[in-house]
Amino acid sequence: MIGEYKINRTTRRCSVGDRPLEPGEVYYSVVMEADEDFKRIDIAADAWTGPPEETIGWWKNRVPRAEEKKREIAPPEVLVELLRSMAGQPAAAKSRFLLALLLLRKRHLKTIEPTATGSPIGAPQQDPPEEGSRDAAEATLSAKKSRETMLLMSNLDQSTMEVEVVGIGPSEAKTLQDELIDLIYRDVDELPE
């Protein structure tokens, strides 16, 4: 079961210099444990010396400029339909898996029953072999013989779908993140109040 954790939004203030972060300024967000909860602090790039010792996770951000287009996530119905439409696209398996995890996290999908026929969720955690190599051919054959899937149900319309659990190597993470962002976010002129 995935736990729910509340982490506060950005304060748009540098916690080191105790000053406001300016539009266009790069900063780092850091999540740390605080008692039995978590807290987020923001640190301007010019004050960043690396993550504090008690850091659980951190990421790089930029304060948006006023003239930049705002983006919002597509409606859940659209994202579930996008997930369905990606089923017949083997090249999109990793993006599809990440989208399914996002929809599970947002509770638009739920797992029905695990249909494990292969390795544990997310395995292997390494880069895939070079295309055309002997290792790639063996990996393809092995993947066809045993693979793990998640059987999911949409909380929107109760339809079901099967999503393959795939491994994602460290060198693929940034590309897949950018691809997923392009898929699920849309530009809007003005966000509704």
Image (tube, rainbow, N blue to C red):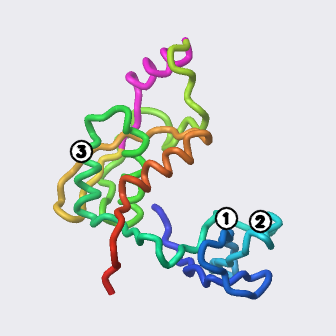
Of 120 and 8, nearer the camera is 8
Q: Quadrant of residue 20?
A: bottom right
Name the N-terminal-most of marks 1 and 3: 1
Give the structural element (helix, strand or loop) at label 2: loop
The range drawn in magenta is 134-149
Tag 2: amino acid:
Pro
- Please say if the residues under marks 2 and 1 sit with CB atoms less than 8 Å apart: yes
Horizontal and vertical percent for residue 124? 56, 35
> Which residue carries the number 1 mark?
58
Residue at screen point 34% across, 32% down: 90
Q: Is residue 112 above or below residue 138?
A: below
Of 170 and 183, nearer the camera is 183
> Could you classify mark 1 by the number of other residues whose Cα lies within 10 Å: few (under 14), some (14-19), or many (20 or more)?
some
Q: CA distance from mark 2 to mark 1?
A: 7 Å
> Which residue carries the number 3 mark?
85
- Please say if the residues under marks 1 and 3 sit with CB atoms less than 8 Å apart: no
Residue at screen point 49% across, 21% down: 139
